[in-house]
Amino acid sequence: MTKVEFFTGSDKKLLGFHVYGHSGYACEGEDIVCAAISSAVFMTMNTITDVLNVPAEVSAENGDAVLKILSKDAEACQSILQGLKLHMLELEKQYGDYIKLKFTEV
């Protein structure tokens, strides 16, 4: 199962995420759930760091992806992070046995 943890500030603004685990929907390389998650996560990371030029703590390796921004940069990143959240919530509705979301205040 893939787990998606969104980090929020005390004001409930999104400050990043941690995505980890293989969904198990299908064999590696054929898993549409993992592909949908991975594509959205990398688009979000690249948009924040390379398009918006927001400094972020970023790592992605071996099916484990993390992005964290400072609260001072939260406003600039809310649209893209909210878009990722909505996408992940929809995947969770459709494929609840393979993806779970949680929200953690940091």
Image (spheres, rainbow, N blue to C red):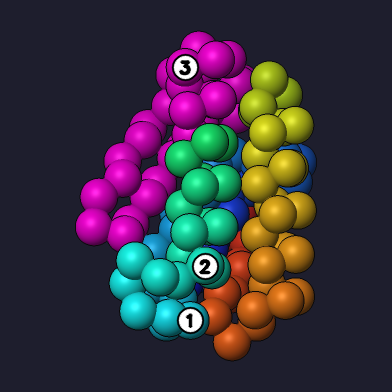
Position of 27 with respect to 35 (left or right) is: left
Disc nearer the start of the sequence (2/3): 2
Q: Residue at x 53, y 57 (%)?
A: 37
* Quarter-of-image position of residue 28: bottom left
Q: Quadrant of residue 92?
A: bottom right
Q: CA distance from mark 3 to mark 1?
A: 31 Å
Q: Position of residue 81 (x, y in %)?
A: 66, 39
Q: Which residue is mark 1?
A: 25
Q: Earlier in the sequence, mark 3 or mark 1?
A: 1
Determine contact: label 1, label 2, CB under 8 Å. yes
First-in-chain label (1 vs 2): 1
The spot of residue 70 in percent (x, y) is 52, 28
Q: Residue at x 25, y 50 (%)?
A: 61
Q: Secondary structure at mark 1?
A: loop
Q: Give residue 38's position: percent from left, percent from top.
A: 46, 53
Q: Tell me, yes or no, whether the highlighted magenta stretch contains residue 24.
A: no
